[in-house]
Amino acid sequence: MQILLGILMAVGLLLIRGLTIKTLWGWFVCQQFSLPALSLATAMGLSLLMSVVIQRKYYLKCEIDEMKNISSVVWMATSMFNALLQVIAMMTILAFGFAIHSWW
């Protein structure tokens, strides 16, 4: 169950990050540099590439030993909290991007 939930959260977050990149690219890069729009698949690929190059961590910093001893309920709650932080971060980035795009 935890593995399935983890996969579903990862795919959902990848979609949200892809949509964020696709939207910001369309608002700023296409107009400024006369480049074509990104497809959702390309934006998700860029998101994966950026996550490899720039490793940001939106999770509670627990020691590895502590992670081994926690229950599955606590693990699931921590994972969902981390996913929520990522969604909030993407929505905040989009909100700032929209404000800049509207003002520009």
Image: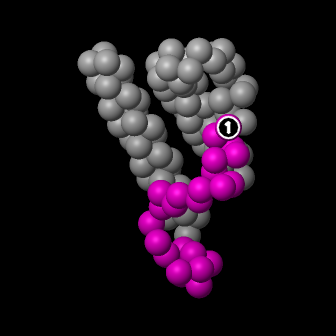
Q: Quadrant of residue 11?
A: top right
Drawn side of residue 28 relative to residue 49, left or right? left
Q: Amino acid at mark 1?
A: Leu
Q: In the rendering, at what x and y percent does residue 45 appear?
A: 72, 36
Query: Which residues are the magenta region?
Result: 46-70
Tell me the residue at 53%/81% (across/down).
63
Q: Quadrant of residue 25?
A: top right
Residue 49 higher or lower than 75, as above or below: above
Is residue 2 visible to us here?
A: no
Is residue 96 visible to us here?
A: yes
Q: In the rendering, at what x and y percent does residue 35 appear?
A: 63, 18
Crowding at mark 1 (Cα within 10 Å: few <14, some 14-19, many 20+): some
Q: Residue furthest front?
A: 33
Q: Quadrant of residue 14?
A: top right
Tell me the residue at 67%/37% (across/down).
46
Q: What element does badge 1 sit on?
A: helix
- Which sits in the foreground, 78 or 72? 78
Tell me the residue at 72%/28% (across/down).
42
Q: In the rendering, at what x and y percent does residue 49 appear?
A: 70, 46
Name the quadrant of the C terminus. top left
Q: In the rendering, at what x and y percent does residue 47 appear?
A: 64, 40
Drawn side of residue 14 relative to residue 102, left or right? right
Drawn side of residue 11 relative to residue 58, left or right? right
Tell me the residue at 69%/44% (across/down).
48
Residue for badge 1: 46
